Amino acid sequence: MKYSILMLLLAGVLLAGCGQDEQPEQKDIEIIEEQPEIEIQEKYSRKDLLFLSDYQGENEKLWLDGRFIIEAKALTVSDPDGKVHYFVGITLDEKGTDLLKYTTEELSKERDTLYIVLGDEVLLEAEVEEVISAGTAIITMNSVEEAEELAEILSREDDE
């Protein structure tokens, strides 16, 4: 299945409130460019989701990974114009929340880029503008089917 990730919204988004007919605000991360459609293989699990800086560059650094995800679920939200948006809401555990906060503190100093990678495919690249202290993330998807499949992958326990 192909996924095109348009944006990542972090900080202050409560997943419980995302199921309501309100569109979450994008506050802390600005998208640099729209990502092309990519193929995500079903063999992946949450451990394969990586938060990196300088992806495949000389100074590539892994900040945190999907092992800290405690919940991933597909969400649907309608905007005031009636357009439906599809998301995958991710909740991190306490350590993941702390790591995300530290990551964004460091990356926001120079407005560096954070890459969200699943396996070897870049799902999203975003410029970090502010510190993100909430342990939630929302990834925009193209369809409810894509959102449900990615949520299932990110909820999958490792086979090891």
Image (cartoon, rainbow, N blue to C red):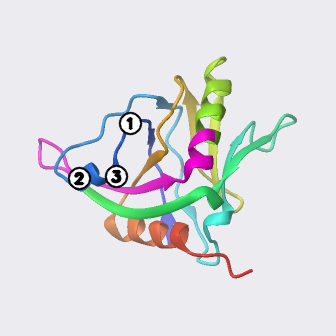
Report which residue position mark 3 lands on: 15
Report which residue position mark 1 lands on: 12
- Which of the two discs, 3 and 2, labels the residue nearer the N terminus? 3
The secondary element bearing badge 2 is classed as strand
Q: Residues within 10 Å of mark 2 (few under 14, many from 20)?
A: some
Tell me the distance, in whole angstroms, between the alpha carbons under discs 3 and 2: 12 Å
**Mark 2 or 1: the one toward you:** 1
Tell me the distance, in whole angstroms, between the alpha carbons under discs 2 and 1: 17 Å
Report which residue position mark 2 lands on: 77
Identify the amino acid type marked 3: Leu
**Mark 3 or 2: the one toward you:** 3
Q: Was residue 99 drawn as part of the magenta stretch in this picture?
A: no
Looking at the image, which residue is at 54% across and 26% down? 131
Identify the amino acid type marked 2: Val
Looking at the image, which residue is at 39% across and 28% down? 27
Q: How many callouts does the rendering have?
A: 3
Q: Residues within 10 Å of mark 3 (few under 14, many from 20)?
A: many
Quarter of the figure with residue 58: top right
Q: Split into 4 quadrants, where in the image is the C terminus?
A: bottom right
- The residue range painted magenta reads 78-98
Q: Residues within 10 Å of mark 1 (few under 14, many from 20)?
A: some
The secondary element bearing badge 1 is classed as loop
